[in-house]
Image (spheres, rainbow, N blue to C red):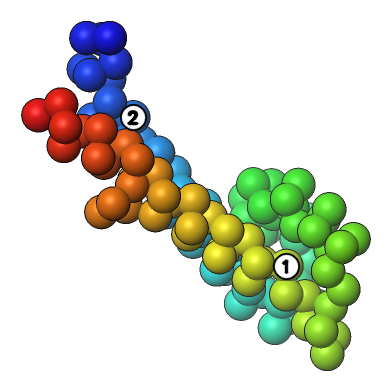
Amino acid sequence: MPWLVQVLPLMHFVLGLFLAIWTLTFLIRIVMTWYPQVDLKKGLWPLLAWPTEPFLAPTRVVVAPIGGVDVTPVIWVGFVSLLRELLVGQQGLITQVLLKTS
């Protein structure tokens, strides 16, 4: 248990940073839905497609485009934001454990 207490602050920071960056990539994908002519296989766009497309593709099977606009990135922004808040937000699980151990 003591090793977990030592690793918890780093885990809190890394997880929070990862979820924030992941949310940002989904937000950029939302903006990219406004420009359907963008080729995700050219330039730097694969850097955004690689971490998001494995989650967006199965979601597109369940949720059809609304008015021709892909809304799946919006769903994932909501989900990742909720996950971030539940884990590392002010009242998040990891945050509360950190507060109890200090």
Residue type indicated by callout 1? Thr
Mark 2 or mark 1, which has the lower sequence index? Answer: 2
Instruction: Establish if 37 lies above or below 41.
Output: below
Residue at 22% across, 19% down: 5
**Quick one: quadrant of the C terminus?**
top left
> 10 Å neighbourhood of mark 2: few (<14), some, or many (≥20)?
some
Residue 21 visible somewhere in the drawing: no
- Say whether residue 95 is left or right of residue 54: left
Give how far apart the Cα atoms at labels 2 and 1 are. Answer: 28 Å
Q: Quadrant of residue 62?
A: bottom right
Q: Position of residue 35 (x, y in %)?
A: 72, 81
Q: Where is residue 39 in the image (x, y as percent from the top left)?
A: 78, 66
Q: In which quarter of the image is residue 59?
A: bottom right
Q: Name the residue under label 2.
A: 11
- Say whether residue 19 is left or right of residue 96: right
- Say whether residue 72 is left or right of residue 101: right
Element at badge 1? helix
- Say whether residue 19 is left or right of residue 97: right
**Quick one: quadrant of the N terminus?**
top left
Residue at 69% across, 47% down: 50
Residue type indicated by callout 2? Met
Tell which of 66 and 100 is nearer to you: 100
Q: Where is residue 66 in the image (x, y as percent from the top left)?
A: 81, 84
Q: Name the residue under label 1.
A: 72
Instruction: Establish if 81 lies above or below 8.
Output: below
Tell which of 69 and 40 is nearer to you: 69
